[in-house]
Amino acid sequence: MANGNPILQIQDISLAFGGVTALNGISFDVAEGEICAVIGPNGAGKSSMLNVINGVYRPQQGEVVFRGQPCTRMRPRQIALLGMARTFQNIALFQGMTVLENILTGRSLRIRSTWIEQGLNIGRARREEIENRRVAEEVIEFLHLENIRKTPVGKLPYGLQKRVELARALVAEPVLLLQDEPMTGMNLEEKKDMSCFALEINREFGTTIVLIEHDMSVVMDISDHVVVLDYGAKIGDGTPDEVKNNQKVIDAYLGVSH
């Protein structure tokens, strides 16, 4: 649960591509331990916001502060080393590799051994392999992937591939998890499973989650905090109930008052 202290601070972020403004003076805080949903119509700037947060895009104005450290000028790898992980809207897995092999790639930032140590399986490499396997197996059990751990990812249905991608992010042991439309393309049962996993990850590991999601029932059910974007501007920021009853949000996105 959220403890009130901000783990992520978005401070007056503006981002433009040529003459097109993607984000215009966006500011909000994400409290440690909360689930924060970023919502809005297509083209509102949601994915651009995530890309700024994890260093893929560098804004023309503003600052991102993660765990008290300004990181706007950092590269994605540097930010990941601070404890941030991400899943993507489009599945980015190695289709010919097994579930376990894909998940283990998420431990790459934890590797300190040299190529020689890895080739000979000695010293740090041996200790790292044991630890990486232990963490991977824990996440596989947590996400109920035991029966498909040796299956090539390319043979799995879409919903399970999304779960494998989540597992790959979790083995990095992030304190902040970014999810870009984790439930897009899923059926009702798959959405229910992923919603439950998000809540369990938040409760069991204390992981702060920032997610983009279009399904408003999911957003209202699992979120502690909702930020609403529209045409690159922030038009709502508060609890699910506050956002649901915000007239600007109703007019721009929800369509009707619920």
Image: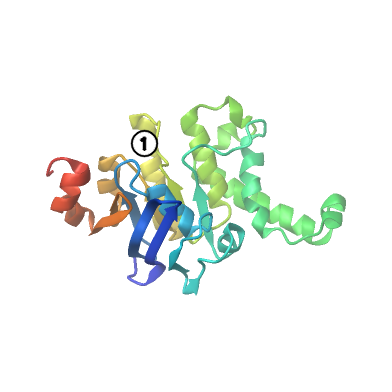
Give the left or right position of residue 172, taking residue 25 as reference.
right
Residue at the far bottom in the pictured view: 68
Give the left or right position of residue 121, taking residue 154 as reference.
right
* Nearest to the observer: residue 62 or residue 102: 62
Tell me if residue 111 comes above or below residue 4 in the rendering: above
* Nearest to the observer: residue 146 or residue 121: 121
Give the left or right position of residue 79, taking residue 28 as reference.
right
Tell me if residue 258 comes above or below residue 185 in the rendering: below
Q: How is the image coloured?
A: rainbow
Q: Residue at x 82, y 53 (%)?
A: 118
Q: Residue at x 61, y 36 (%)?
A: 99
Report if residue 141 is visible in the image.
no
- Secondary structure type for disc 1: helix
The residue pinned by badge 1 equals 191
Q: Position of residue 38 (x, y in %)?
A: 34, 51
Q: Residue at x 52, y 59 (%)?
A: 84
Three-letter code for the amino acid on which mark 1 is drawn: Lys
Which quadrant is home to the C terminus? top left
Which quadrant is home to the N terminus? bottom left
